[in-house]
Image (tube, grey):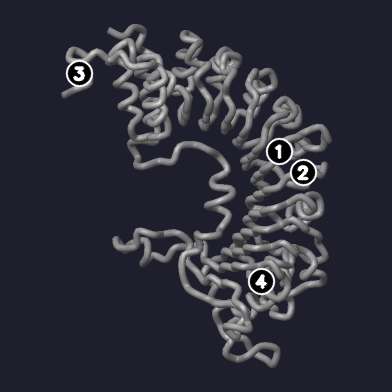
Amino acid sequence: MSLRALQHVYDFRLPQELLRMVFSYFEHKHCRLSWLASVATVCKAFYPEAEAALYRWVAMGRCSQVSVFCRSVVKRSHRAVCVRTLVISVRGGSTIRQHLQHALPLLTNVSELELVVDDSSLFDLLLCAPFRLRCLVLGGVYCPLSLEDILASQPYVRSVSLEFVGASKEHLRSQISRPDLFPHLDTLAINTTGFSFTLVKHPYPIAHLSLNRARHDDIAHAIKLLGPTLVSLKIVRFIDGQCTSACFWPTSMFTNARLPRLQHVDITDTYDPETELARNEREMSGPGLGEACPALETFSWGMDERVMLHLYILTAGTVWSLTMSVADAYANVLFACFPALTHMGLFTTTTTTARKRSRAATDLRPHGRVFEREDPENSGAPFRATEGVLIDFRLSSRLFGREGFGAPTCDASCRCCLLDHHEVLANILTVH
């Protein structure tokens, strides 16, 4: 029996609190948003709570969707009050400026905002926005010159992600140096392609840092500036011709550093096609490495398959046993240097063609070698190595997730399902 047919059989006089509980269950069930949009038309008793649930989480991927949404909340201002999470990721953006100017002042309860647009002038609209954000994601081509003022207008933000991909001399003047910024900031994620971390000048008390496409200068500056407060560090390194052979080993970044609180490190290496670093096993351990991270518990290192092959060959010479691979030797160094280290993982960042084509291979998560600390008195070895999935302790799935908070997609049809039903709901003026 359809919902509309049920309307004539039952009297839906349920308490508002119960209706709110029912509809809140479907807020993040992205494939069932069509059900929410349909149930809003069943009866007047359902409409308020269904509408509120439908507008609580809003994601838009086209300028036309942004225009429809803005007209909807301007025409019915109570809808704007329902919005808690707003995701706008569109190409261009100049055509939606006027619509956003009218809608943003009404969105007083937004706590999570993701704004990714090509037109950097749109970010200036956030300077007068009434909401107090907890999470902020900004991205696009160029970083706005008013970035510092935008961040200053959100004193309660706890997570900030800057995902800009274009760099120019004019936009590189945007610095983050005001000491009164980020009184509550806990997590910072930056794509250094469009905003170098060297532009951050003040040692803010950041616990979790994520850097994407980071070069040597970005990493060195981050460790020096934020070292005393960092608890977790996630870096996608960009290895180019400026790197030395010591950079082959990711722990080289901790040489003579002081990170007393650092517990989790997740490093993924990407390489310039023309760059191939020489592997020097004597550079595995640098000066002061043992004192750099006394609290380090987990360490994972991702690389492409050609680098992984270098780590699986046997070591040569008299330093290591001939039966020990380079990966085993590196694990030996790390477990000896870091007394709190419990897990170390090595994984490849490329999925083999065979695994991609295999219908039985449903698990395409990173696979590699996992090293777990053992008691030498009981096992006779400092660690135990196994082959498996590196997902139990990797930061990318537990601490950081994805830097944004847009909707996960179930299939091609549900990517924009939310906005499709916002268009339906925007045209509903009365419920019969």
Q: CA distance from mark 3 to mark 1?
A: 49 Å
Q: Is residue 49 left or right of residue 147?
A: left
Are the residues flagged by discs 4 and 3 in contact, CB closer than 8 Å? no
**Residue at which label 3 appears:** 6
Q: CA distance from mark 2 to mark 1?
A: 7 Å
Q: Amino acid at mark 3?
A: Leu
Q: Mark 3 falls on what kind of element?
A: helix
**Residue at which label 1 appears:** 185
Q: Nearer the viewer, mark 3 or mark 2?
A: 3
The image quarter in which residue 146 lies: top right
Q: Mark 4 falls on what kind of element?
A: loop
Q: Nearer the viewer, residue 239 or 393?
A: 393
Q: Residue at x 58, y 48 (%)?
A: 400
**Residue at which label 4 appears:** 277
Q: Nearer the viewer, mark 4 or mark 3?
A: 3
Picture coordinates of residue 158 (x, y %)? 67, 36
**Residue at which label 2 appears:** 205
The image quarter in which residue 410 lies: top left
Q: Residue at x 76, y 34 (%)?
A: 183
Q: Mark 1 falls on what kind of element?
A: loop
Q: Amino acid at mark 4?
A: Leu
Are the residues flagged by discs 2 and 4 in contact, CB closer than 8 Å? no
Q: Earlier in the sequence, mark 3 or mark 1?
A: 3
Inspect this view and state whether residue 286 appears: yes
Inspect this view and state whether residue 221 appears: no
Q: Residues within 10 Å of mark 3 (few under 14, many from 20)?
A: few
